[in-house]
Amino acid sequence: MKPLRLAFLGTLVSCGVLALSACDNVGRAFDLNRGDTKETTTNIQAVPAGGVVVDGRPKVQNVFPKGNGWPGTVPIVVVFNESVNEASVSPSGGTPSLFVRLKSSVGTGTGTGTGTGSPPLPGSYDFLLGGRVVVIRPLQPFDTTQIQEYEVVATSELRDTDGVRYTTASEKVLGSFTPDQASTIEDGQVLTVLPVDNNREAFREDSVYVVFTKPATESTLKTGAGGSFTVRPAGGTALDGSLAFPVRIGGLGGGGGTADTRVVEFKPKSGTRLAAATDHEIVLDATIEFGTNGGKLDFRNRTPFARFSTVAPPSASSVTVGNPSTGAPDKVNSNNVAALLLDVAVPADAAAGDRVDARIYGLHKDGGQTGSLDFVDASAVLAGPGAQTASVDFTGKLGALGALRFREGPLLFAARLVRGSRTTGFVRSATTNNPALDVTPPTLTLPAADGNGNRVIYTDQERLVFWGQGAEVLGGATLTLASTPGPAPDPTTGTVFGFGAAGKFMFDPILLGRRTAPLGFTLTITDSSGNESMPITGSIVQRGVVTGDVTSGTLTVEAYDDATFAAVAGATVAIEPGLPSKPAVGRLTAVTGADGRAVFTGLGSSSYTVTVVSDAHHVITLLATPAGFVSLPLRPRASAVASLVGAAVFTSAPPTGTRILVGCNILDDVRNEEVLTGASTPTVVPSSQVRPNRPYMLTGLGGPIEPTAKPTFTHFACSVCGVTGLTKEAAQPPIAPAGNATVQLAMLPAAFPIARDLAATYDKDLGTWGGLDAANLAGTPTVRVMASVYGLPGMTAVGTGFAKVMSGTIYTIDASYLMALATTTPANGPLVSLQPKFWVSTEATDSTGNVARHRRIIDKPVLGTTFASAAVPGVSTLTPPGGPSTGSPSVTYEDRMDPTTIPSGFAFQVITATDSGGRQWRVLRQDTDAATGPVTVQLPDFVGLGATGLGVGVWSVFCENHLLFSSTFGVGDYVLEELRREEVTYTRSVALNFTVN
């Protein structure tokens, strides 16, 4: 029981969504088979749990109190033969249809006739026994000194749950009473018990209530052997159970406010019900007290005080959809709406021939007021006795696609058992599965369709995580590829990784290898109700691919926007054999078409330098590549990045001084490995520049950062790990260029071990890191644990550590990381299917600004063991220029990379020049040999090119080195973005100024 207007908020959606109860709603036109031929509209409320519906008008069986001698605290109890519509009893903002008033001299006041009188007394309304009993508690006690008669009145607006009116008369007086007991009397009386005395049709699942005329002293109310309020089989021993106070003062029913001890409930022991077809006794004794001076219960020494008998049939146990779609329990969808079955479970003492009545409540087809309801019903007969599941056939009752009985929206199922003339109360469907009617197939919002209806998924990864978003929360998806995606005979069907809020979904990584042409796909998505979309077709386009063999005589160059992945048309492409020279020798030029491509044929060299220039973009060059297909990213000069800001949300307060280390795989600057919150503002995730149009994951670790000893993390977060931290959830939606994303990072308390420490520390001698002044560092080296996963760019911080100086330039490295991401069982490891690699990343910056980073792989993440490699970072120190240059300068750097130091090692140098206007020129070179020493690179000559490069003046130039591990790369055969995802060492030199005339 709960107070009227909040009666079912604990089990149903509130008014305005599906007002299955407690809302003042005009319902459907009345069904003539339900007993009232005069109604054209009705207020329907879903029958409450334990409720009753009968044919015809509702009837009043009992009204309490009657006559005189009552205290001013006496409540009013009205017992009906069926459940009443709670909203009709006391509509929100309206006049109640059942009320107490001071009897007037005007009117008959006979107790059964009609009349007029004083206004209704303000009061609260509570409903017991499945809405069959209404308890009215006036807000102010009756003034017993006035010796006035009051009457209980019902109006024509009082209805049962099916919307049938109690009376067609404007009002009807149900009874009268006079509260005239002296206030000095503290003894209390029993107003009534429920079921009422001598009731022969009590339900076996019902609670038993006693309603006192005054508040009882709670400490004197006890049940069980020797208790003051017990229930027992006739002549037997007290039943096991507990007492509760369902009516509250100053709060919501069911727990808020304080107990109103005028109404006391006996609940049989959990999991039990009253015996079938059995006489029961309610026993009370004089140890129940009232008032402050030990007033006693005046129960007239009746032992037992009252008797009632139970019906034989038990109520049903549960009601669910019997033919749901996979993954869509209790959903009525396009697959089952025409021939829906409800499964009604009945207990072991069900009998052959028992009838199962079932109902489905839904939103009225014609709308009307918000939450207006309709219902359909059907029955089935049990063929045999015992526990079983009865299938109730609703074929045709819900209509068909295009002609539904209800509007789409929430549903409620109800069922009861009937044996002869005896019935049980209804049970209702559980809210766990959110029963609903939804026959509309879901629609796909991302990838969006272009003007021609084409949908394209772009990726710059070697493996694709197919990410998308529906217009609603999804429960399923299928992906079929037009051909084998990668170099190996991989399957052409995708495996779903996970779903998430706002309709997002993601598939496990798909190996693309190197694709120079789009790969077609067919996608279907299924909503949480089980409706499947029509097949959606599109294509997968891989960017950033370098592959093929230019000795075939053909070189295709593709230019694309790094922020949008769109082809860049109208860009100037220049190629020249081998490494550039000045002036250019053998240079060829072309302009990209609408597809962003320029094709050169009839070539004779074994390698070419490729330069792409677009006025709206920064410049890029790939040196001396033997590839026959080159897809190069052009970073736009405007809207190149997006921003990410947010809040860390804690369910329990973090310790003082906590900082959050936030990991994000799309941080724009390759030097940034994480985002840190402030110690005084741990909930504020500061704004960071990120790479647009790429799905991303977020992680968080709360604790002492930077640690100086093994840290104890108090909170953690993982956006792909669900609300529990252990379930798969799709990555975050891509952010548009220049867009701003605000995220909430749910920081879960460390209720279980969330971190794994390294099994052993290890030492690194930074003095061996060439080009780094390890004796003069700008600060203590930082230690992070990074995770790289297939299909998502970059790396994500998942842990932190510390470097402790041992002697000179030798540091001992230790670290801890998120255990949830490292577990290897699919049930507990959200990232398992993304095949993560974990790296301990140690980074140092010397006093002049050179940066060097080393990553050591954690080969057994569950155990925390690491694998030592021979990779040593080396800064490619630039040689100062000898003077100004006319046109493009040459750049000399110290090559300190040897890709052969690690198995499957690959090395790349990136020279970046920036003019005074901020335009950049990135020059990439694959280092294919073990040779070290000075290397001079002439930047391509722009004279005669017909395109505008960097402006004259002072250029700031630096060199970055990337040493990475890849089992799939080759010389002139790679995917550019893997440089960041599989990085083992990284260095960046101090920038030098070059004067260019």
Image (cartoon, grey):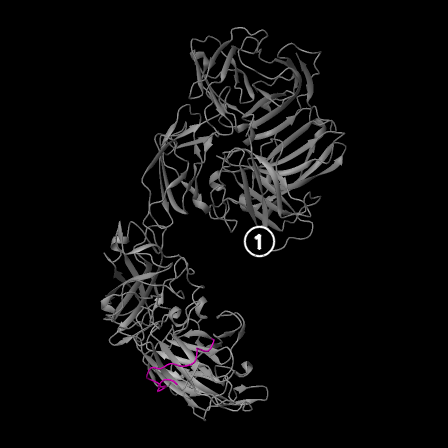
When the figure is inspected, residue 364 is found, relative to residue 660, above or below; the finding is below
Instruction: Tell me where residue 462 appears, x and y as whole percent.
Output: 47, 29
Instruction: Tell me where residue 752 appears, x and y as whole percent.
Output: 57, 53
Instruction: Tell me where residue 469 appears, x and y as whole percent.
Output: 43, 41
When the figure is inspected, residue 594 is found, relative to residue 462, above or below; the finding is above
Q: How many marks?
A: 1
Q: Is residue 613 left or right of residue 336?
A: right
Q: Is residue 559 left or right of residue 992?
A: left
Asked whether residue 117 is drawn in magenta, I would say yes
Residue segment shown in magenta? 106-122
Asked whether residue 939 is drawn in magenta, I would say no
Q: Nearer the viewer, residue 90 or 421?
A: 90
- Quarter assignment of residue 636: top right
When the figure is inspected, residue 448 is found, relative to residue 277, above or below; the finding is above
Instruction: Tell me where residue 272 appears, x and y as whole percent.
Output: 40, 73
Label 1 environment density (alpha carbons within 10 Å; few <14, some 14–19, many ≥20): few
Is any atom of residue 194 visible in this view? no
**Helix, strand or loop at disc 1?**
loop
Q: Which residue is mark 1?
A: 752
Is any atom of residue 779 visible in this view? yes
When the figure is inspected, residue 799 is found, relative to residue 50, above or below; the finding is above
At label 1, which amino acid type do we have?
Phe
Q: Nearer the viewer, residue 229 or 377?
A: 377
Q: Residue at x 59, y 7 (%)?
A: 582
Quadrant assignment for the C terminus: top right
